[in-house]
Image: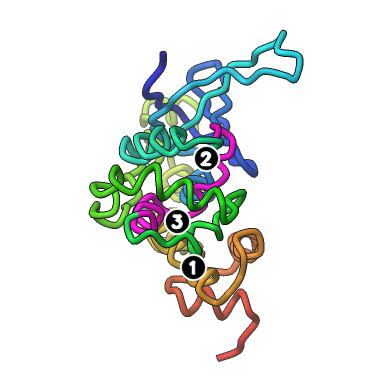
């Protein structure tokens, strides 16, 4: 069984990522927490800690292999633990992980069934069952430091064209002028600061704190990330989302 895979992030869809490893593109199912961190990372290398399962149809005569990915090993371990709760299957556990592992584990530790029932697909009865099953097993997850997005390598810079090649084309002088002009031009300002993942997570948590349900919070966040306007702080992000003028 594959436990870790590294490749170039090709696409991020609603509940999955597509990862290019050599000539092969893999489907990796991801929870909402991972999706938020990957939204702005298309085209960059990413490493997933993965687990696999077989998904069958109603008749049980056809099974499709599926791969689930997380950015940290701790997230994967918590997911495996979450799946041990009675009546919580792989798909339900994956959907429910719309909040960070630390938050969910902390809610289980303090036996907060009401909070757990706000997770997608988790009702009051299931929330009680989660507490009964996991309250003695989640301490280390509840005490873990706030999750930080793994450092994803920046794309490699293109190698300079050798002078010999430029001379062979009779364009050395023109190329030199273009190169100098390119060096003088300032790099375009990124839409989000280097703390992409953490800032996006902060915005999502703030929207939830304002009373939005997970679906509406995700819709607002997606709109923010596709509006094309830069933001460097939580306040700037909320101002863009709610159309305030300052």
Dot 1, how many residues are within 10 Å of its Cα: few (below 14), some (14-19), or many (20+)?
many
Q: Does the magenta segment cover residue 188? A: no
Q: Estimate the spatial distance between the alpha carbons at disc 3 and disc 1, rounded to whole Å.
A: 38 Å
Which is nearer the N-term, disc 3 or disc 2? 2
Comes first in the chain, label 3 or label 1: 3
Where's the C terminus, which quadrant?
bottom right
- Where does the image place residue 241, in percent across and percent down from the top left? 61, 74
Q: State yes or no: discs 1 and 2 in contact (Cβ < 8 Å).
A: no
Residue found 56% across the figure and 60% down from its top: 118
Secondary structure under tag 3 reads: helix
Name the outermost residue toward the bottom: 246
Residue to which mark 2 is pinned: 93
Q: Are marks 3 and 2 in contact (CB under 8 Å)?
A: no
The mark closer to the camera, 3 or 2, is: 2
Q: Where is residue 151 drawn, in percent x and y? A: 32, 45
Magenta segment boundaries in residue numbering: 89-108
Near-viewer residue (116 or 205): 116
Q: Give me the disc on residue 203.
A: 1
Q: Residue 181 carries which label?
A: 3
Q: Where is residue 117 in the image (x, y as percent from the top left)?
A: 54, 58
Q: Going 65% across and 81% down the picture, which residue do you hit?
A: 243
Marks 1/2: CA distance?
23 Å
Work out which quarter of the rendered image holds the N terminus and state it.
top left
């Amino acid at each position: 069984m594959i436990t870790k895979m590294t490749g170039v992030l090709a696409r991020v869809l609603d509940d999955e990522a597509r990862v290019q490893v050599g000539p092969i593109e893999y489907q990796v199912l991801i929870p909402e927490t991972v999706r938020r961190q990957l939204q702005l990372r298309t085209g960059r290398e990413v490493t997933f800690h993965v687990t696999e399962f077989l998904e069958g149809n109603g008749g049980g005569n056809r099974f499709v292999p599926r791969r689930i990915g997380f950015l940290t090993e701790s997230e994967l371990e918590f997911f495996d633990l979450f799946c041990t709760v009675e009546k919580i299957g792989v798909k339900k556990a994956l959907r429910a992980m719309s909040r960070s592992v630390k938050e969910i584990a902390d809610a289980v530790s303090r036996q907060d069934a009401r909070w757990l029932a706000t997770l997608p697909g988790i009702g009051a009865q299931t929330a009680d069952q989660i507490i009964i099953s996991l309250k003695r097993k989640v301490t280390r997850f509840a005490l873990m430091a706030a999750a930080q997005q793994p450092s994803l390598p920046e794309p490699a810079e293109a190698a300079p064209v050798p002078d010999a090649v430029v001379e062979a084309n009779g364009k050395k002088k023109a190329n030199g002028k273009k190169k100098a002009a390119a060096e003088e031009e300032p790099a375009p300002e990124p839409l989000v600061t280097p703390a992409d993942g953490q800032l996006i997570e902060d915005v999502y948590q703030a929207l939830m704190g304002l009373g939005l349900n997970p679906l509406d919070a995700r819709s607002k966040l997606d709109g923010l990330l596709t509006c094309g306007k830069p933001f460097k702080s939580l306040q700037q992000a909320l101002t863009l989302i709610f159309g305030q003028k300052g």
